Image: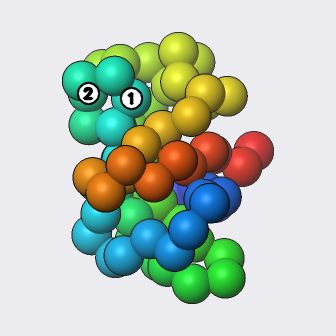
Amino acid sequence: KKLYAIKSEKNLKIGDDLSFGNNKVGTVLINGIYPFALIKLFDPNIVEFKDKILLSQNNIKTRIIS
């Protein structure tokens, strides 16, 4: 797992899960103006979802900033 900056359309809550498809790929650790999430690097491989939209458990669209 690795810490990544994320961008979302609305405010996320600390502890919100992020998913891609049916897979949980991360968890929000820091919310606010500059949110960060702990993202899995494998299973699924981060290459599959790094530039795609992730959904929080409240269906908030989120992207990884790289």
58 is higher (above) or lower (below) than 32: above
Q: CA distance from mark 2 to mark 1?
A: 5 Å
What's the residue at 37%, 49% (across, down)? 59
Image quarter of the N terminus? top left
Packing grade of label 2 (10 A; few <14, some 14-19, many >=20) is few
Decide if residue 21 is in sight here: yes
What's the residue at 34%, 37% (across, down)? 19
Residue 56 shown left or right of residue 37 in the figure: left
What's the residue at 39%, 64% (across, down)? 28
Asked where in the image residue 33 lies, by quadrant, the reply is bottom right
Q: Position of residue 3 (x, y in %)?
A: 51, 57
Residue at image mark 1: 20
Residue 23 is tagged as 2
Q: Amino acid at mark 2?
A: Asn
Q: Position of residue 22 (x, y in %)?
A: 24, 24
Residue 29 is tagged as none
Image quarter of the C terminus? top right
Q: Position of residue 37 (x, y in %)?
A: 46, 60
Q: Amino acid at mark 1?
A: Phe
Asked where in the image residue 35 lies, by quadrant, the reply is bottom right
What's the residue at 44%, 18% (across, down)? 45
Q: Nearer the viewer, residue 9 or 52?
A: 9
55 is higher (above) or lower (below) than 48: below
| SS category of the residue bearing label 2 | strand
Q: Position of residue 41 (x, y in %)?
A: 44, 32
